[in-house]
Amino acid sequence: MQQKITLRLRPEEAFSESAIHRYISQHAGVKSTAISGYHTLKKSIDARGKNILYNITVNAFINEPFYHSTIQDFHFKDVQTSSKQVIIIGAGPAGLFAALKLIESGIKPIILERGKDVKSRRRDLAALNKQGIINPESNYCFGEGGAGTYSDGKLYTRSNKRGDINRILQLFVRFGAPDNILYDAHPHIGTNKLPQIITAMRELITSCGGEVLFNKKVVDFNLQNNTIKEVLTADLSKYSADAFVLATGHSARDIFELLHKKNILIEAKPFALGVRVEHPQTLIDSIQYHCNVRGEFLPPASYSLVEQVNEKGVFSFCMCPGGIIAPASTNPEELVVNGWSPSKRNNAFANSGMVVQVTSEDTYKHTQHLNINTDHPLRFMYFQQMVEQKAYQLGGGNFTAPAQRLVDFCTNKTSASIPENSYLPGLQSANLMSVLPDFIYKALSEGFQVFGKKKKGYYTNDAIVVATESRTSSPVRIPRNNETLEHPQLNNFYPCGEGAGYAGGIVSAAMDGERIASIICEKFSSLSNA
């Protein structure tokens, strides 16, 4: 018989096979010899009390032979001679998982990626971090694998109604991810491991007859009779297909501007903007684990904070324990910062985005000089861009970022010095009030003080605030039909993923890509049977 059992164990017991085996035996009321093995189904930490415990759910094999878990079978077909082809614009998680789903159904995907392959991106990231040189087509946001490849690889999502999360995680394991992502409460791969996984996905796509083409920036659409006939890339190549999936991510401003120019309907979408805050990891450990020194069986601690300040939501975003702050800009003279962690999360600092909700009223006040009306679909994007440009100027150029110590930020004091930190291009002490719109600055300042009361030790000048965290989500939504998922004006055009406003991270984007691909497959099947 097999039995699901949930155990609450001390940290040292949670990593002991013999201890887990013993507790399963006690819980099931059988002799230890009756337990042939178990699979871990879920694993999480409960750090709310003084004594920290692991919650572990297992599937125990009792009085029957144990078998090792196996990865789900995926049946990828040869699509080289497929009669149907789909152009996918963008090789991020939405685009890659859409391509894999199409191949399972025998349809050929052709991915057009504006940036470089995942290995070549490294040289451009090095130039950005060490020399302050930005490649607008190859950076932390653009290139094979999308924005998540070199900015962490967190796989946690609350979007459990949008698709099969387990299938997405199983696919990641199929391509080389560690199997603990299948049961960890907050699965994470790490920037050091994701590139190999993305490469394996691409090799599977091409081995099945699909195509992945790099340095193919889409610059125009040829529209005829409510359909897209072909797309034009910057190198003057033209590509036609039966359907077109737009999966360009949240930073492809040129695509948003192109759609607006072509009178293809887009909508302004509220987003959040703020800063990155970085503490010593040992400090976050002591706050979260209620101890002076983190034990060897506990991972670097993380946190999640949210507060309403003057009717504004202030919340942590993309928290990176043992992580690094990185320049995530996509254009010269615009400064964006993001965070990432390696798989071991073993760096000395913990960073998190700390952001504030932005509304239409907020953007109107700060973009009046641009002479755009209150219902302009790109008004949030222009607001975002304005703040990024101010941050670049205040940092002094070359992607040096303006920063303050945390308490100094809240008391409107330019810091006399900036402590050791993880941001490689370097930090410049500055007053961030001159970068951030007033409503964001005030909400963050009050929010940090409230968080300091909730988490004793959080409000400290040992922490730094770095501007600006502005790419939390797309500032534009590209509408689509609720049932067919097509754009309401174009019957073969499918806006997809985070850039279109329908996802918020790797897993939700991957699920949306699969969903789009499934709809396309159903449409092709119904047309062939008509």
Image (tube, helix red, strand yellow):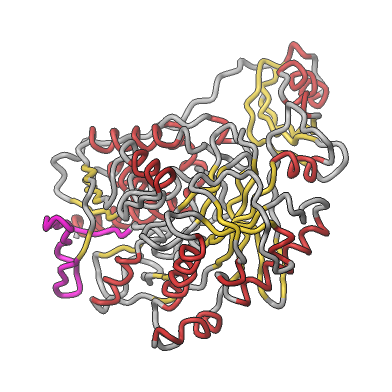
Compared with 329, 440 (above or below) is below
Which residues, given as a range, are shown in magenta?
Answer: 220-246
Q: Nearer the viewer, residue 209 or 484?
A: 209
Decide if residue 172 is in sight here: yes
Residue 186 coordinates in the image, percent (x, y): 62, 43
Is residue 185 something one can see in this rendering? no
Image height of 95 relative to 75, above or below: below
For this orientation, the residue located farthest to the right is 50
Q: Position of residue 463 (x, y in %)?
A: 70, 51
Task: Looking at this view, name the residue that lies furthest to the top.
Answer: 33
Residue lying at 86% horizontally and 43% vertically, measured from the top left: 49
Q: Nearer the viewer, residue 76 or 204?
A: 204
Total marks placed: 0
| Residue drawn at x 57%, y 43% as measured from the top left | 422
Q: Nearer the viewer, residue 371 or 117?
A: 371
Depicted 465 relative to depicted 13: above or below? below
Residue drawn 33% across the image and 43% down it: 100
231 within the magenta span: yes
The picture quadrant where one finds residue 315 is bottom right
